[in-house]
Amino acid sequence: MADLETFRSETRAWLEQNCPPEMRKPMTSDGDTFWGGRNATFSSEAQRVWFERMRDKGWTVPHWPKEYGGGGLDAEEAKIVRQEMAAIGARAPLTSFGISMLGPALLKYGTEEQKREHLPKITAGLIRWCQGYSEPNAGSDLASLQTRAVSDGDDYIINGQKIWTSYANYADWIFCLVRTDPAAKKHDGISFILFDMTSKGVSTKPILLISGYSPFCETFFDNVRVPKSHVVGTVNRGWDVAKYLLQHERAMISGMGERGVGRPLGQIAADSIGTDAQGKLDDAQLRSQIASFEVDEAALAAAAERAVDLAKAGQSHPAFSSAMKYYGTELNKRRHEILMSAGGIDALEWESERSKGGARPRAWLRTKANSIEGGTSEVMLGIVAKRILDLPGA
Amino acid sequence: MALVLTEEQSMLRDSARGLISDKAPVSHLRALRDGKDADGFSRELWKTFAEMGFSGLLVPDQFGGSGLGCVEAGIVMEEIGRTLMPSPFLATSVLAASALSRGGSVAQKAQHLPKIADGSLLAALAIDEGAKHRPLQTRLAATRSGNGFKLSGDKAFVVDGHAADLLIVAARSAGSAGDKDGLTLFLVDPKAKGLAIERTAMVDSHNAARIVFDKVEVNADSVLGEVDQGFALLESVLNIGRGAVASEMVGLSEEVFGRTVTYLKERKQFGKAIGEFQALQHRAAQLYIDIEITRAAVLKALQALDADVGKAGTAVAVAKARAGTTATLAVQEGVQMHGGMGMTDQFDIGFFMKRARVCQELLGDSNFHADQLARGKGY
């Protein structure tokens, strides 16, 4: 314990010295997130400095092994880094699907060669990944996917279409689910494969969403040639890798709400609506909604902390991330409903100087996808019912 | 600190669970109710609690207790919640023991704490006066009289008030209802002149009392803590109690949920287990998630209480508010999913619904605690 306290004070001192003041402010726009990649640009000098210092320290991904570019920290130390970063409001220096999704799957299922090839480029922010899972006819029923990979010597030839591929138009590589055995039962003929998005035959088309943004794409594969050595795990056993990765994706999405960051909801609402003589929000119904929300938000934060501690103690259920995903996304939708109500007519401005281009209503609309992407709330509840509660059927 | 139980805490849980599930399953409460037991709890079982070190769990070592903390008290409360065991543990071992060990003089501690630890003294905390838990609204008057005070007013929902050997009474010695200043805690002998106790059997077959104080004389030595400055002590004691009741509700919720899921797997309609129906599967899953999140919030609050009672207020408000809504949902879904059987007295599930309703009100309901949180954050 004494060692951990030393580690905490050293971490605090290092962050204090190295995290630029600008990087301790809440993010206000998409440009504040640094995703890395071949074509990455920094939105500010502070963002560059912060990223490079954390990269050199190995702390873009503190808990990955050092030989793959991580910080080599154990779970307890990594938790301390997270806590100390949160204490000063430090932004994540690098955000990527490589860190939150592919990395954990490669660490578990990848060959040594695959780990050494891909993980250091993730931690260094050199390659930006996207996820090729959903298809037009394979959404909640993901395992019915039809994108085909046909053997051709040492390669596969891939044909098909993916949809809802987040930031495919900016990504350098894709981790993709393809059908390698169309005769097998639907879960048994799928493989998990990696390839470069600049490969011949890959094209993307952004999808305009209700928020006015296009974070997702349709992605098309037209005779794309990929070496067989790029399959992760066993051929036709890609569903195991896919499911494992989904647990991490769901854990990430459940934490997407900007919890405890920025100004408290009650104060945002008070600024906008006003307070009565006793200082209480001048909308009793909204006040009680916010209070209930904050109770649940604090409880979820405790549950997220406990989930990590349980995993470390070897006491967690593998499907628990579905529980967290369900609750976290539904809570985030509540948060943005409250923000819209608190903002009133001001929050309706879509294109205006004052509204910064309609940031609030666009963010509100974006959250509606939270309970759909990565598995719908209904799919999550089904997983909890069957895998954790062991209820019969289906 | 990790939000999981330590090895020692897990062992405590196992031993509490072993004892309580063996000696006091729900049928124990049912028998006490049906026999109209004068105490409403088993004194023999309380003796066993003392022998196992549970009654003095929060009593410091030097007064014969185990000197453990709120996490450990919560572990015992959770097991009590699973079987709805009526026990002096909350009133005596949590509330009174905390009040005395935190606010008592050397003499007061030496007089009472060893007896709490050995199980020979039962105590009760008298707070509530109106229909809702509003400690700041305390009106029971303490007027100076000679060397001491005279107490006049009414208390209600005094848990174990009918069986207590010692009452701890919150009174207003100055100021007016709503003020933080002017509250004083008193140690009062329930046999004192001018004091009338009416046992009120509650909806959940647990114990409480209404107490009327008519110019009850207490001397200066009866003051627990400081005159007029009792609020901070009271708030600490109440928060410890709230953490304990929240734990009881976690145990209660989990037990109801476990019984309900078992029923969903066994009960057949339309030729299949009703647990195959998605409408019920999703509701069961939502309830499971709700309970797990509440469990984490409650453990967080108990750890916060052990770290620094004075800074645990927000975590406790979150825990008690969550525990109230979760337990309410658990018992409502439990009765509904048991169908007609859930409405029968023969099935235990109704006992859980009744106890959850009482626990919700006990030391402040979900609305009270959400409001506390909002006030604390300044909106």
Image: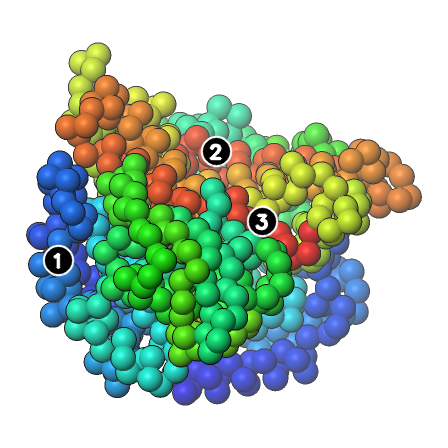
Question: Can residue A344 be seen by looking at this rendering?
Answer: yes
Q: Nearer the viewer, mark 3 or mark 2?
A: 3
Quadrant location of the N terminus of chain A in the rendered image:
bottom left
Q: Position of residue B117 (x, y in %)?
A: 21, 73
| Disc on the earlier residue, 1 or 3 | 1
For image coordinates 34% across by 30% down, the residue present is: B333
The answer to which image quadrant residue A370 occupies is: top right
For badge 1, the amino acid type reads Arg
Q: Secondary structure at mark 2?
A: loop
Discs 2, 1 touching: Cβ within 8 Å: no
Discs 1, 3 touching: Cβ within 8 Å: no
Q: Position of residue A385 (x, y in %)?
A: 31, 35
The residues bearing labels 3 and 2 have C-alpha atoms spaced at a distance of: 33 Å
For badge 2, the amino acid type reads Thr
Q: Position of residue A272 (x, y in %)?
A: 80, 45
For badge 3, the amino acid type reads Asp
Q: Which mark is residue B371?
A: 3
Q: Position of residue B244 (x, y in %)?
A: 35, 58
Q: Secondary structure at mark 1?
A: helix
* Residue at the farthest front position: B146
